[in-house]
Image (tube, rainbow, N blue to C red):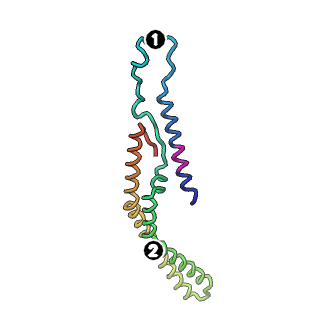
Amino acid sequence: SKWEPMRAFTQLFLFLILAGLVAHAHTTPPPAPATAPRQTAPAATVPATPPNPGTKIGIMIFQDAVFDSDAGKAAVAAIQKLIDPSKTALEKLSKEMQDLQTKLQNSKVESEQAQIRKDIDAKTVEGKRVQEDAERLSQDLQAKHLQPVAMLVNKVVDEYAKANNLAVVNA
């Protein structure tokens, strides 16, 4: 929808705010006790203590990162294009089943009803087979097209985590 880019921007903005707050909470030193001895060295010569490595936490919605990326959108489009024939076949079978059910309800002759029931059974078996084939195809296509995108997102997240001193990124 037209709000998707704004939603992604908002999620990124909130993530950055949260990461900044967590980092600030972890890098702010506790107040010095009142009885602490005074330092004799000038302040300019005392090295500032760097923040502890890996003290920040990042949170992201991994699925959104995969599907909202350009590569993810392209993968979903490719998968959809390859699954459409199966979807069309299932819709056709469903329509045929509805027609047979209507024909069965309107039939008055027992021999005709028996043939219609036989046809319904055959369409049911065919429908299950087509559905199973479509599910298998969908799983194969997702592994082929989405797995590389997920690996890319993981790589980008890892690089971002290292660059921004994140100890953990929860997805």
Residue name at image x 41 percent, y 30 percent? 52
**Spatial distance from mark 2 to mark 1, Cα to Cα?**
78 Å
Place of residue 152 in the rendered image (x, y in percent of width and height, measured from the top left) = 38, 52
Q: Nearer the viewer, residue 133 or 123?
A: 133
Q: Which quarter of the figure has residue 4?
A: bottom right
Place of residue 1 in the rendered image (x, y in percent of width and height, measured from the top left) = 57, 60
Residue name at image x 41 percent, y 24 percent? 49
Read off the residue under disc 2. Answer: 85
Q: Which residues are magenta?
A: 9-14
140 above or below 170? below
Read off the residue under disc 1. Answer: 38
Residue name at image x 51 percent, y 78 percent? 92
Residue name at image x 57 percent, y 81 percent? 99
User: Label 1 sits on what residue type?
Assistant: Arg
Q: Nearer the viewer, residue 112 or 13?
A: 13
User: Label 2 sits on what residue type?
Assistant: Pro
11 above or below 128? above
Place of residue 133 in the rendered image (x, y in percent of width and height, measured from the top left) = 41, 70
How packed mark 2 is, by other alpha carbons closer than 10 Å (few <14, some 14-19, many 20 or more), is few
Q: Which quarter of the figure has residue 136?
A: bottom left
Quick check: 109 left or right of 44? right
Main secondary structure of the magenta stretch? helix
**Mark number displayed over residue 90:** none
Q: Magenta segment: does it hold 32?
A: no
